[in-house]
Amino acid sequence: MFSKLWQWLKRLAGAGGTSEAESVRYEGFGRKYAECAKLNLTAVVANKIANVACSDSDVALVGAGKRALLLAEAVNPVLDKLKIVAARALGVGGVVLKPRVCDGRLEVELLNQDRAVVLERSGSDIRKIAFVAETFDSADGELVRVELHSRDGKGGYVIEQRALKNGREVPLTGCAAWAELPARQEMRGVFGHLFGWVKCPVDDRRDGQSLFGVPVTFGCETLMVEILEQLDIFQSEIVDKRTFIGADYRLFKRDDAGRERLLPQANIFKKFDAAGGIDDKPFFEIYSPDMRVGALSDAVNFRLGLLEKAIGVNRGVLTDLAAADATATAIKRSTVDTFSLVDALRGEIERGLNQLLFACNVLADVCRLPMGGKAELKFDWSYALIEDSAETFAQLAQGVGLGAVGADELRGWLALPVSGAQ
């Protein structure tokens, strides 16, 4: 299906579009992230960093009026999935937040970046892009809805809806779910993209011209293979070191009536002696060797530590944080690299969500949805990774005592209500 879709998209491509090789590459990122058959190190790292980035943080849409309610209905479900959005952006390289108007309301589609194909660009400015928005399996083939966004750089913006069946274009009415969608929407005065894009902040190490992101573990494929191989060795050791019993050969012989001896079938092995006689040895011998737990654990942890360094995070993401003898200040300093990546990810999230809000407002205006009121996004990120709350409180309290900090600032930090507020 991808080949047929690409051939159709290539006929629409202009200057500087995404090549088929690049599209295959980005699709590979998504496929690897979705693998669940064995330990997925990219997913582990992505989820860990997303947890740190989103936990104890508050991202909210605030506002009043009918427009605020309309926007909240579309944006709040995305905010509820913010950790998933962050983890997926880190895992596949980027997530597109694409709004659309459906039945008089706004809704947001979350698409992995491999569902986007740049058709035309001017430097880093996307002029034309296609999104594989939806796919359905029908009785006579696969239906695909492609959404095309085009802009001329002078405020003109066009959104087109196309439907394909087995790589051939068909009317939107071919699928009941798409029959009411406008085939073409033309807008003026739009100086920005009508979609958000949350990208992984990791450098792709190439020429810097790519508009797509790469996974957080990009460039670490060989090391991750070595880690998985080491874990397989660890598992083999567990299997190979199972306790078994060696039994005298005479216990395997038939009895006088010709019946087989009734011995357990698992973990029982026949003993024999090259000289031909073992009558002076015990009937049973138990073999229970010690496992090389320490050596194997050290080998795995060593490679996990290398992976942490390659990604650019501190110990504690994949390995245990050595904090037994460390002071609170030393622990905070040991997480600076991790916080740097987390902070960069938060910046990408803010840009993507603000662009999404802009797109929602534009589409609401074009479709004449409720106009009264407005809304904006407020970001209150947690800095617990590098801050000590007790130390911060002591500093603020001391500032209040010296008159350098107002009591309202301390109250705001404690998130206490202002006296007399309703």
Image (cartoon, rainbow, N blue to C red):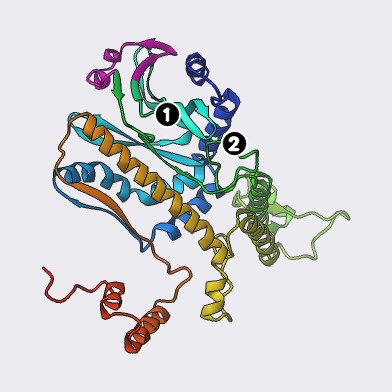
Q: In this picture, is 104 found above or below 373?
A: above
What residue is shown with label 1? 153
Mark 2 vs 1, N-terminal side: 1
State the residue in front, 161 or 284: 161
Locate residue 28, reporting x and y percent.
56, 33
Q: Is residue 360 left or right of residue 219?
A: left
Q: Residues within 10 Å of mark 1 (few under 14, many from 20)?
A: some
> Is residue 172 highlighted in magenta?
yes
Toward which corner of the image does residue 319 lie, by quadrant?
bottom right
Assign the C terminus to one quadrant of the image. bottom left
Tags 2 and 1 in contact by the CB under 8 Å rule?
no
Q: In this picture, is 22 found above or below 1?
A: below
- The region drawn magenta spans 161-183
Q: Is residue 382 left or right of residue 267?
A: left
What residue is shown with label 2? 209
The amino acid on which the numbered mark 1 sits, given as a three-letter code, is Gly
Locate residue 242, reporting x and y percent.
64, 57
